[in-house]
Image: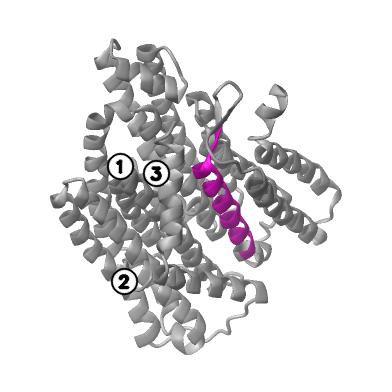
Amino acid sequence: MDFMSDFMPASTEIFLLGMACVILVADLLIKQSDRLVTYLLVILTLMASTLIIAGTHKSGVTYAFHGMFVDDLMSDVLKLLTCVAVVMMLIYSRAYLTLRGLFSGEFLALTLFATLGMMVMISANHFLTLYLGLELLSLSLYAMVALQRDSAIATEAAMKYFILGALASGLLLYGMSMLYGATGSLELGVVSQAIQSGGTNKTLLVFGLVFVVSGLAFKLGAVPFHMWVPDVYQGAPTAITMFIGSAPKLAAFAFVARILIEGLQPLVQHWSGMLIILAIASMALGNLTAIAQTNLKRMFAYSTIAHMGFLLLGLLSGGIEGYGASMFYAIVYVLMSLGSFGMIMLLSRLGFEADTLNDFKGLNQRSPWLAFMMLLLMFSMAGVPPTVGFYAKFSVLNAVVQSGHIWLAVVAVLFSLIGAFYYLRIVKLMYFDTPESNAPITLGQDTVLLISMNGLGVLLLGLLPGALMSVCAVAIQQSLLLH
């Protein structure tokens, strides 16, 4: 019975690992021309994972492996959405990668291992489990960025990502070791109790906290730990950039929430001050620098930094409402990011990357429907009603105001207004400029359907945000605050 009680909560991860190994071996026997078989196997694996997550869901909080792994509503919701985001990424990127000779078994296997890393991060209840998930995800992403071996810019991006990632992992490990030294445990719940009971070395705790927050800020891409984001986003193939900029953000949210809210909640007065500095710096640098960019991927990289600043605002405001708003923001950001990078890939063709602002000139004349979808995505990124981006920003700002940081909400609104400029500039180029190229846009039925669902989903969620918002609030309440 004890054996089953350990393995049932982690059944999705076990299934995913088993299938990743099976697909790795099967791919050796499949010819390059039949790569579609491997692709379909990966899609089916991810879909089956969503069914397992839904089928094994239990109300309440379940611990496994001596408290190192936790299964709760927040983890189930985020894992489900992670699988959906990865499936969307694969559908968007199939044609793009095939044309560039990158649609290989290695890419598909690394995608599954990265997804497994994300799931472990989401369900971790112990510093070691968190670190294992993080490294599994990071190592897969380093390899994916470097997949385009004949591209000097991709190799450079992979090297920067790897070196800076190793540095951040070192910071995180050092911080964790200090917290272990102060509390005598690596389990998040025990760490929290030890801090609450007092008697711990306060200096050691605060130093450990500084290192841990620095490591977390790197993984989110918050200023001043953002150096890798623009170079990696621009240097990696667009499909890999889409992957880095979407699903891992859900895992990063869970990672930050588990450590700060669940493990280090008693030190909230220390880490909320750090998050205020990180959030303001990220929104300022992200929005101001994005204005100067002509490369779309680089512009989205700086906008990601700004969005992560907003995500941190929800966390520092404290309480169920703030944490729920932050989770909602992470989910909405992933949806918007998938659509935005998807559009770059849909307009790209062999020997041509549609990754500069000029490539979107006159898109309305070439394809009115695609231009409308991009308009919805850009309005959502800018926070223009009635898209879901507006509601996401509003819910975070509302939580910040209710926590008493009115000045912080005013600063966030000012930077949001600056940010709206570079998103609306894309809309202006699409509708009011003449196209630089009249090359036909050839699209598969699956990608047209997906970009349509993506764009309309952003609008529909903006009109009816209540259901998702309440799921986030209930997940936070049941998962983090009842532990």
Residue 32: % across, % down? 80, 57
How many neighbours does mark 2 have within 10 angstroms: few (below 14), some (14-19), or many (20 or more)?
A: some
Residue closest to the far top? 199
What residue is pinned by disc 2? Answer: 384
Nearer the observer, disc 3 or disc 1? 1
Residue closest to the far right? 29
Residue 8: % across, % down? 68, 34
Relative to 216, does residue 105 appear above or below in the rendering?
A: below
How many neighbours does mark 1 have within 10 angstroms: few (below 14), some (14-19), or many (20 or more)?
A: some
What residue is pinned by disc 1? Answer: 319
Mark 1–mark 2 distance (CA, rounded to whole Å): 26 Å
- Residue toward you, 330 or 365: 330
Residue 43: % across, % down? 70, 56
Asked which secondary structure carries label 3, the reply is helix
Quadrant in the picture for the C terminus: top left
Position of 342 with respect to 375 (left or right) is right
What residue is pinned by disc 3? Answer: 220
Residue closest to the far left? 407
- Residue toward you, 149 or 409: 409
Q: Earlier in the sequence, mark 2 or mark 3?
A: 3
- In this orientation, does residue 210 appear? no
Magenta residues (range)? 70-91
Residue closest to the far front? 59
Q: Amino acid at mark 2?
A: Val
How many neighbours does mark 3 have within 10 angstroms: few (below 14), some (14-19), or many (20 or more)?
A: many
Mark 3–mark 1 distance (CA, rounded to whole Å): 21 Å
Answer whether residue 73 is magenta in the image: yes
Magenta segment, principal secondary structure? helix
Q: Amino acid at mark 1?
A: Gly
